[in-house]
Image: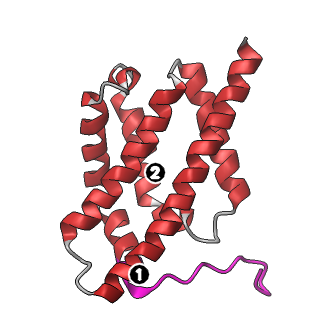
Amino acid sequence: MSPEGKKASIHLTPVSQKLVDLIERNAAELTNAWLADIRKDPNTLTYRHFDPEAVHARAFRVYSHLGKWISQETSKEEVARDYQELGAERCREGFALSEVIQALILIRRNLWRKVMEEGLLDTPYDLYQAIELNNRVSLFFDRAIFYTACGYEKKKRAVD
């Protein structure tokens, strides 16, 4: 922690920061693409019958706050708390755990699809920096998926 009691952010390389900015700036577009994906994915049937505005808000939150999620501003414990709550909530709502995990996977997939479409990775150095960002994003999603499953299973045990 810094002397002011605040956690310091992880320093992002210029290319990584550019990619995070791209994702956050295009959060609405990414969310709409994700919504289209979950509506046609045979592994996310419950999402088709759930309130579209609520589903939209959930994905938009991930995309629009990506920089926060992959920085030291957000601790592992915060990710655990938020995503355990998400897992418990999805269990209460009647989603299958596999659907929730697939929805998170599709969020991540759409994120990288957008990065690749933009063609911002012109040099080997840009690609190297993008790999560094990919590692951070992958760690976040790995934790999000794990803690979502933990929260879901805990809620399921309490209900059974």
Q: Which quadrant would residue 85 be assigned to in this image?
A: top right
61 or 105, which lies in front? 105
Distance between mark 1 and mark 2 Cα atoms: 24 Å
At x 59% / y 37%, what residue is drawn?
Answer: 86
In what quadrant of the picture does the C terminus appear? Answer: top right
Q: Is disc 2 surrounded by few (<14), some (14 to 19) or many (20+) residues within 10 Å? A: some
SS majority, magenta: loop
Q: Nearer the viewer, residue 17 or 98?
A: 98
Q: Position of residue 32 (x, y in %)?
A: 26, 45
Question: Does 142 appear above or below 53?
Answer: below
Residue at (42, 38) in percent of width and height: 103
SS assignment at label 2? helix
Q: Which residues are magenta?
A: 1-18
Residue at image coords 41%, 56%: 63
Q: Amino acid at mark 2?
A: Arg
Q: Is residue 27 visible?
A: no
Residue topped by disc 2: 61
The residue that disc 1 covers is 129
The answer to whether 18 is drawn above or below residue 137 in the figure is below
Residue 145, position in %: x, y?
A: 56, 44
* Mark closer to the observer (1, 2): 1
In the shown orientation, is residue 134 left or right of residue 2? left
